[in-house]
Image (cartoon, helix red, strand yellow):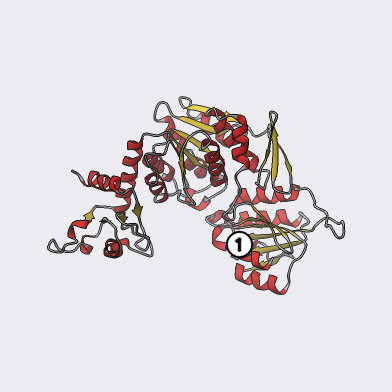
């Protein structure tokens, strides 16, 4: 029995894996991954002591001598990460279920959540949890699927060329959807065209194997051109132009073909994500009332387009991620939302924004931040707060409030509280703008 087969037999006995020695379930497989700041090989012994059945390592030095009673619980491999990926791929082939991969610059997670709710009306689904969408997260997502799973949904993230191609090799999707091609991870992809080519690796994979299907928004010229580059690929196009949106107290409400969907989503840009979920549901013959109910059941969390009403202000918290495309869309949408009159004065509630740096833009960073600053100058916001070194540089000649980091902004808000404002909060994850909520 070769090493991979031995691992898979052990996995089938207790289908749980761990990459963290502090989180061990009895009988699980421990994979000693290496990172920039850690080496999982150093913790293999602790994982076994905590109850792991096997420890997969790629440093022979941590394996005790053959005379040690724990020697047989170590499995030495060339590369732990590659072994984890191979095990996940084997498991995916063994399950043999249909699988949908979702990638794109913006909206991946929201689209994934909407589609998962729609497809769960017909199948027992298994879907990417949290942000497990990279070279480690995708294998863990696949290994979390079991014999009860009837349909898999895998989110794929990437910041460099070749990463989506590799994730496709691991997950072997039958269906694929690219939400959009935006200005994200420009540094890693080497520019806008690199982003398009990188996300397009999903369509490349699907086109290389007969019988695969790709979904795309025909309103997006980048997605149309990617689909056209693969004439042999079976494609399903859809549009968001027939989704007519308006705003309610809870979020975006859309009408399409006699259907009304009252969502909990903020932002006109979410029409595209809703259109994706509707298209997938229709393709898989989910009845229209169930599609509506599924989409309406999704309430955003984890700092993604969340609406808050504090004791003093109304907030739109979208601080999970930011890039030039999503930042511009969020600002445009915020400006388009209908004005809400103050119940006491009857005057429109003042709108303010708190924006944090957009990261991983490389040589495009300065211009991208300056473009946002210029957009803000004519927007008429009551207050503008910009956080991070890039925004501080870009707004050096503007009359905006600038802060090097979020704790400094929090100190300012503590001393100068805002009251009665409608506030958009958006920035990259590393800026941690959600910390401002306590002071708003």
Q: Residue at x 55, y 49 (%)?
A: 184
Q: Secondary structure at mark 1?
A: helix
| One can see residue 78 in this view | yes
Q: Residue at x 66, y 63 (%)?
A: 386
Question: Which quarter of the figure has residue 182?
Answer: top right
| One can see residue 153 in this view | no
Left or right: residue 323 compared with residue 379:
left
Residue located beneath label 1 in the image: 434
Q: Nearer the viewer, residue 237 or 188?
A: 237
Left or right: residue 194 compared with residue 350:
left
Question: Which quarter of the figure has residue 192?
Answer: top right
Vertical arrangement, residue 352 with respect to residue 146, above or below: below
Question: Which quarter of the figure has residue 349?
Answer: bottom right
Q: Residue at x 57, y 41 (%)?
A: 114
Q: In the rendering, at what x and y percent does residue 234 appear? A: 48, 26
Q: Nearer the viewer, residue 376 or 49?
A: 49
Left or right: residue 381 compared with residue 66:
right
Q: Residue furthest left?
A: 67
Vertical arrangement, residue 36 with respect to residue 265, above or below: below
Q: In the rendering, at what x and y percent does residue 168 appear? A: 40, 40
Q: Nearer the viewer, residue 96 or 198?
A: 96
Q: In the rendering, at what x and y percent does residue 356 appear? A: 62, 60
């Amino acid at each position: 029995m070769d090493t991979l087969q031995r691992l898979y037999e052990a996995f089938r006995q207790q289908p749980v894996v761990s990459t963290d020695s502090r989180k061990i379930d009895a009988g699980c497989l421990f994979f000693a991954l290496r990172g920039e700041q850690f080496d999982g090989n150093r913790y293999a012994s602790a994982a076994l002591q905590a109850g792991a059945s096997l420890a997969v390592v790629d440093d022979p030095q941590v394996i005790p001598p053959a005379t040690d009673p724990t020697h047989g619980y170590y499995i030495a491999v060339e590369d732990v990460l590659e072994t984890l990926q191979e095990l996940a791929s084997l498991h995916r082939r063994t399950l043999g279920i249909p699988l949908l991969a979702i990638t794109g610059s913006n909206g991946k997670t929201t689209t994934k959540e909407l589609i998962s709710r729609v497809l769960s009306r017909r199948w027992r689904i298994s879907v990417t949890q949290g942000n497990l969408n990279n070279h480690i997260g995708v294998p863990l997502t696949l290994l979390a699927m079991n014999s009860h799973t009837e349909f898999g949904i895998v989110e794929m993230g990437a910041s460099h060329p070749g990463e989506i191609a590799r994730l496709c090799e691991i997950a072997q999707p039958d269906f694929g959807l690219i939400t959009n091609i935006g200005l994200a991870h420009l540094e890693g992809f080497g520019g806008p065209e690199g982003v398009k080519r990188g996300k397009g690796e999903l369509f490349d994979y699907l086109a290389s194997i007969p019988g695969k299907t790709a979904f795309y928004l025909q309103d997006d010229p980048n997605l149309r051109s990617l689909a056209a580059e693969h004439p042999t690929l079976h494609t399903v196009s859809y549009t968001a132009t027939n989704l007519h949106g308006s705003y309610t107290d809870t979020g975006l409400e859309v009408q399409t073909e006699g259907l009304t969907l009252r969502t909990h989503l903020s932002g006109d840009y979410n029409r595209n994500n809703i259109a994706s979920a509707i298209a997938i549901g229709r393709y898989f013959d989910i009845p229209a009332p169930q599609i509506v109910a599924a989409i309406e059941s999704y309430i955003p969390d984890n700092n993604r387009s969340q609406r808050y009403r504090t004791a003093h202000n109304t907030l739109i918290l979208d601080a999970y991620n930011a890039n030039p495309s999503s930042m511009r869309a969020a600002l445009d949408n915020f400006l388009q939302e209908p004005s809400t009159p103050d119940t006491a004065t009857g005057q429109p509630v003042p709108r303010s924004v708190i924006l944090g740096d957009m990261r991983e833009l490389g040589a495009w960073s300065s211009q991208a931040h300056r473009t946002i600053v210029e957009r803000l100058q004519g927007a008429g916001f009551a207050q503008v707060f910009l956080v991070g070194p890039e925004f501080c540089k870009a707004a050096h000649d503007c009359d905006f409030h600038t802060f090097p980091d979020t704790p400094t902004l929090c100190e300012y808000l503590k001393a100068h509280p805002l009251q009665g404002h409608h506030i958009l909060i958006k920035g990259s994850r590393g800026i941690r703008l959600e910390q401002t909520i306590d002071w708003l």
